[in-house]
Amino acid sequence: MERIGHYIGGKHVRGESGRRGPVFDPATGTQTHEVDFADVPEVDAAVDAAREAFPAWRATSLSKRADIMFGVRELLEERRADLAAVITAQHGKVLSDAVGEVQRGLENVEFATGIPNLLKGGFSEQVSTGVDVYSIRQPLGVVAGITPFNFPAMVPLWMCANAIACGNTFLLKPSEKDPGASLLIAELFKDAGLPDGVFNVVQGDKVVVDRILEHPEIRAVSFVGSTPIARYVYETGTRNGKRVQALGGAKNHMIVLPDADVDMAADAAVSAGYGSAGERCMAVSVVVAVGGVGDRIVEAIRERLPKIKLGPGSDPESEMGPLVTKEHRDRVASYLDSGREQGATVVADGREDGRYGGEGFFLGVSLLDGVTPEMDCYRDEIFGPVLSVVRVDTYDEAVRLVNENPYGNGVAIFTRDGGAARTFQFEVEAGMVGVNVPIPVPVSYYSFGGWKSSLFGDTHMYGPEGVNFYTRGKVVTSRWPDPATSAVDLGFPRTR
Ligand code: NAD
């Protein structure tokens, strides 16, 4: 069985702990690789490599750092298809979606090419007689990223592009379910001229995460994953004195007002509900149908479902691939039974698709109508191709539903009424809002992050907030020797 190991100090390193986990091809259900799980000494070796590389890397000029980022961008562009193929083989998403993921990741590298501009400080001349003040931002040191299975290339790139461009050295702990992409990304950075030790990858499980959270040399941790683990990472990391941003799970609502273009809303709900088999933190999970639009939107969604082609991600005809593991697929499918038992109507049952129960971890598109907030299918993050429809009478009820939900990642409203949309963006409690846009993932020069249980910490990820997260400010107050302004003064410094 082919093994997937670590990448430390610019070299591929085989794991020595003896602990390993399986990696599957979700389309066939067969195990294709074994991934090494690091123990504490291997994490420490990666941190040592990063610590040793830090002084020279932080002293590397901004133009040289930008140059390397331009190189990474070119190589990502060139190797986009290879990277997408690895993603599809281990995650299961269709190739076009994997290519899209690489593209959104690449945009973060593009943003990081602007690092000379992004790290510009402020300067105030003559704040006092002969005294100037300027602010600078400096890197933190060794920083770590812990990433989820659902975007094995994009989420690492959200983190590492800015972290490295800001002058930090980086340690990535990818998901153990689809670890292959991480090594390819590490190689691309090296090929673009990144010095050894600046980008390290350590594969593994909770043992690695816990060592990252307690290692005294690691200054900051970026995490993306489920809410319980995000909370744990945030609480443990901050208790150990680290800067932490931890993005958690989601339950994204899409409100459809009675005046919406129903066909457009149905296209959007289907695309955002079932794209990547619903394994996106920005997937639409709940359609909230307001007033009389319920029957029309359910019917419009229902009639689109039979046309969705379920199949292996590597088949260009497929529009939706399998789920990541059998356990996850079975858990997702269980919401169809609990939904029915708790009173929802199963409009489409993905277990009736011929691929369910055969080779691979497939589940067809599923639709539940008449869902209410007490049901498990509403309360839990399902993270699969199960879309729920909640019917409410008024816009106010719809907004209340969203605002009372513990998650606050993405949300969307579909309407032709600009005033309603503006009121919505003003009062809705979520970090990313779409107006007639179902998956409002911010472009790389804004920042990504939810509210409430979808984010622990104060800083959103990537974009300008990413640069702030990976740097700390310093303000210099300076005066050149000038005998005319020199005198002994024991008072507190005042401006003159
Ligand atoms: P996960 O929380 O199971 O795993 C995320 C990372 O944490 C992985 O690297 C994993 O190895 C590690 N981990 C798992 N269990 C751990 C434990 N007990 N202790 C320490 N570390 C542990 O998440 P996942 O299943 O890989 O990804 C799906 C989840 O990620 C969903 O909840 C989804 O909404 C969320 N997600 C959120 C965003 C966002 O931006 N908010 C983006 C993508 C995914």
Image: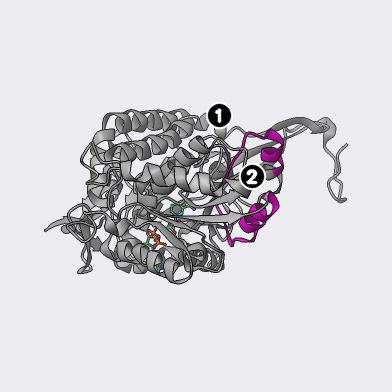
Q: Does dot 1 land on a helix, a strand or a loop? A: helix
Q: Position of residue 134 (x, y in %)?
A: 68, 36
Between the C-alphas of marks 2 and 1, the distance is: 17 Å
The answer to whether one can see residue 392 in this image is: yes
Tell me the crowding category of disc 1: few under 14, some 14 to 19, or many 20 or more residues within 10 angstroms, Cα based. Answer: few
Q: Are marks 2 and 1 in contact (CB under 8 Å)?
A: no
Image quarter of residue 467: top right
Q: Earlier in the sequence, mark 2 or mark 1?
A: 1
Residue 108 vertical placement versus 458 (above, below): above
Q: Label 2 neighbourhood size at 10 Å, few (<14), some (14-19), many (20+)?
A: few
Residue under circle 2?
Answer: 474
Q: Nearer the viewer, residue 334 or 65?
A: 334
* Identity, as a three-letter code, of the amino acid under mark 1: Asn
Q: Is residue 72 above or below residue 220?
A: above
State the SS at label 2. strand
Q: Nearer the viewer, residue 46 or 89?
A: 89
Task: Point out residue 420 in the picture as x, y percentages from the top left corner.
Answer: 69, 40
Residue 341 to residue 121: above or below:
below
Residue range corresponding to the magenta coloring = 395-423
Does the closest atom of ligand 1 sit within 8 Å of the Cβ of label 1?
Answer: no
The residue positioned farthest toward the left in the image shown: 1
Check if residue 46 falls in the magenta segment: no
Quadrant containing the N terminus in the rendered view: bottom left
Task: Indicate the quadrant containing the C terminus: top left, top right, bottom left or bottom right.
Answer: top right
* The quarter of the displayed image where residue 66 is located: top left
**Numbered-mark total:** 2
Which residue sits at x=48%, y=33%?
111
> Quick one: 367 or 482, which is closer to the camera?
367
- For disc 1, the marked residue is 117
Q: Quadrant of ligand 1?
A: bottom left
